[in-house]
Image (cartoon, grey):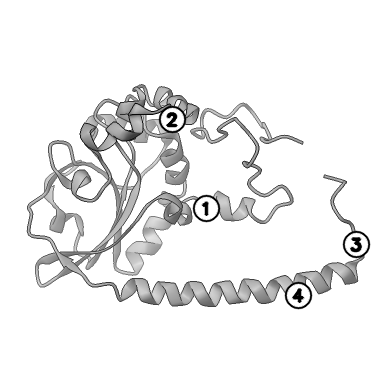
Amino acid sequence: MTEHKVGTREEWRRARNDLLEREKELTRRNDELARQRRELPWVRLDKEYRFDTEDGTKTLAELFDDRSQLLVHNFMYGPEYTAGCPVCSAAADTFDGAVAHLNARDVTFLCISRAPLERLQAYKRRMGWNFPWVSSQGTDFNFDFDASHTAEQLAPFLEGEVPSVVVELATACGTDPAGYVAEGPVLSAFALSDGAVYHTYSTGARGLEPLMGFYPLLDRVPKGRNEGDSQEFWIRRHDEYEGARSGGSG
């Protein structure tokens, strides 16, 4: 790290002020994207979905819990998994702190997975989480919102050489690569108006990074995410890290 460019405080301040202008521009662009996101057309949902919850079976409308907005994270925990996805688990470590603030703004937040409810509840206890988590087992919900995939859809991917990271994650979840990639993380928003439920927004892949609060923090330290050249997939469940390991290479 000491090979990095070193300058005076005055040089740092000039460079920092130049960067600040670009950061402000990005903030303004993000505000505009947020506005455009809210202007997407809504799609009314007429299909009936029923979910297993700790309070019994509920419809999608009932999951709103007397609020008008619902934010759903499709957590990767498939029917064959023995533990939740480590990446989804890393994101989920931030959820408990956000729930009360979202509720205060008329938003209900919860996770949905296809694993049986009792398995989800046991994993929640292991991880020490309290956010709502329901099971969509036996419904089309995950498939309809691109969070679960059929064998036919996965065939082209599985016919090639499966990336080692997929094998590693599948093993961590107690399943095989086909079982692992049958699930996918998706964040979706819904609105409840006059008794009808509307789908308003969904995102996946890097669109899910706002859920992973540690990534923006890593972006602000000298080494950044430090993932580019490493062959090791570093993310673990929070109870699986080795002591105070710093991670990454010097």
Between discs 4 and 3, the one toward the N terminus? 3
Q: Amino acid at mark 3?
A: Gly
Q: What secondary structure is found at the residue carrying circle 1?
A: loop
Disc 3 to disc 1, how far (Cα)?
31 Å
Callout 2 secondary element: helix
Q: Which numbered circle lies on residue 166?
A: 2
* Residues marked 2 and 4 touching at CB (< 8 Å): no
Q: Position of residue 127 (x, y in %)?
A: 42, 34
Instruction: For label 4, count other residues whose C-alpha is less than 10 Å away and answer few (under 14), some (14-19) or many (20+).
Output: few
Q: Which residue corresponds to the image point at 34% horizontal and 38% vertical from the top-left?
A: 76
Mark 1 = which residue? 213
User: In front of the other: label 4 or label 1?
Assistant: 4
Q: Which mark is residue 7?
A: 3
Look at the numbered discs 4 and 3 and tell me whether their residues touch, using CB distance below 8 Å.
Answer: no
Q: CA distance from mark 4 to mark 1?
A: 25 Å
Residue 116 visible in the current orientation:
no
Q: Quadrant of residue 66?
A: bottom left
Foreground mark, 2 or 4, reads 2
Near-viewer residue (109 or 186): 186
